[in-house]
Amino acid sequence: MANVAVIGAQWGDEGKGKVVDWLASRADIVVRFQGGHNAGHTLVVGGETYKLSLLPSGVVRGKLGIIGNGVVLDPEALLSEIAKVTGQGLSVSPANLRIAENVPLILPLHPALDRAREAARGGDKIGTTGRGIGPAYEDKVGRRAIRLCDLAEPETLSKKLDELLLHHNSLLKGLGAPLFEKQPLFDQLLAWAPQLLPFSEAVWERLDAAKREGKRVLFEGAQAVMLDVDHGTYPFVTSSNTVAGNAAAGAGIGPDAIGMVLGIAKAYSTRVGSGPFPTELHDAIGQGLGDRGREFGTVTGRRRRCGWFDACMVRQGVKIGGVQGLALTKLDVLDGLAELKICTGYRIGGAVMHRLPAAMAAQAAAEPIYEVMEGWAGSTAGARSYAQLPAAAVKYVRRIEELVEAPVVLLSTSPDRDDTITLRDPFAG
């Protein structure tokens, strides 16, 4: 049986939680390989709703969860999340959660710098969550990050804090923000040490053993391809590589172990925060999609911007992300619309393009070229086979497959985990 890597094929919030939960119930290990607590998955299991930001979805299903080195970890956020799900009846311990010893930590100074920068941008805000993700990744590549393993070495920790504060306080001072003192940070890190270090290990060794033993591993991505720091709508992106290729580096395993790449896409488009969105709707249809789809961010609580399905952008995500099959979600949200539109290209300055360009001004100027399709009066909600779908709904799905050049292997027709049409088992390779 193959492993599976799950990534978003749009701008995130595609309903990965339900799909990942379904896959996690059949996996042995679930690995988070990038991002931080700026992304969330909502899982509904046995009538209980779990909102996860850092914990791998597998912990809800009693599977081993791993937080890989590609993640940036906020200790306070993790401990708070563990306490919350424990209160909901789950058990989280070193027996079912392991954290890479080399994972970089998010400290209180990181969100402080994040928020100060956004405030300084004024009307040109990127729309970050203000949780310190970007500054933490900067420290990682700047080789000054404090990592989980450093909590076991107080002398090393003290020296690294000196370097970190020299850098951050200089920036905070220039932005007119309050500065940080060393001792409170040092004391806080030492207090976190006994709570976090029991989870720490060289997870690459565990994953290597799992590979040799033939265990099923699910690599759980956060955000989506078009938020990738290299390939997304830069600078309105996240601070990590969200493509499936990063699952190997972010977990500590060879690329041959990634397995099938499953891309998640909504049957329409949404986006949170700032940045280009060619198919965005500012009318009653867009409002209706947001209302019926309950389009509010799990982490941010912000209402998502809504628009028509952008096949041009998803095809780009499929190619860049290495997607081999799509899970199409929220088809039922489109029920009752008389007509539907699919973006098949863009007009930019008089030219026609079939990709989103890299340049910022060109992205903002992109105007969608639409193909109009017939909607359906019947309901798709709860359908568990193609035979239960209206003919126009099947035609819509088939057209999406043609345009994005990838097969739909899973089709979600409600938030219920079992309301899924399975056309191909991702774990079958």
Image (cartoon, rainbow, N blue to C red):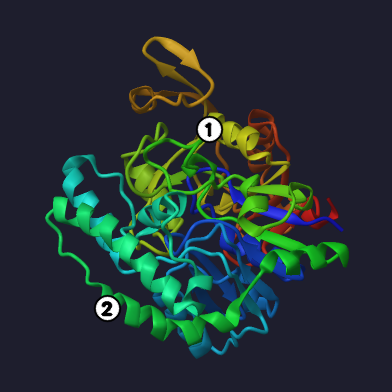
SS at mark 2?
A: helix
Residue 175 visible (yes or no): no
- Residue furthest left as drawn: 176
Closer to the camera in the image, 172 or 411: 172
How many discs appear? 2
In screen coordinates, is 317 left or right of 208? Answer: left
Q: Amino acid at mark 1?
A: Met
Number of other residues with Cα within 10 Å of mark 2, as a class: few under 14, some 14 to 19, many 20 or more: few
Q: Which marked residue is nearer to the observer: mark 2 or mark 1? A: 2
Image spot of residue 359 (x, y percent): 39, 24
Report which quarter residue 213 is drawn in: bottom right
Residue, x 34% and y 57% (percent of image)?
A: 129
CA–CA distance in space, label 2 to label 1: 48 Å
In screen coordinates, is 128 left or right of 46? Answer: left
Q: Disc number at residue 313?
A: 1
Question: Does residue 307 lie above or below 347 as drawn?
Answer: below
Residue, x 43% and y 35% (percent of image)?
A: 233
Contact between labelled residues 1 and 2, with CB atoms less than 8 Å apart: no
Question: Does residue 299 lie above or below 153 as drawn?
Answer: above
SS at mark 1?
A: helix
Question: Does residue 142 lie above or below 230 as drawn?
Answer: below
Q: Disc number at residue 183?
A: 2
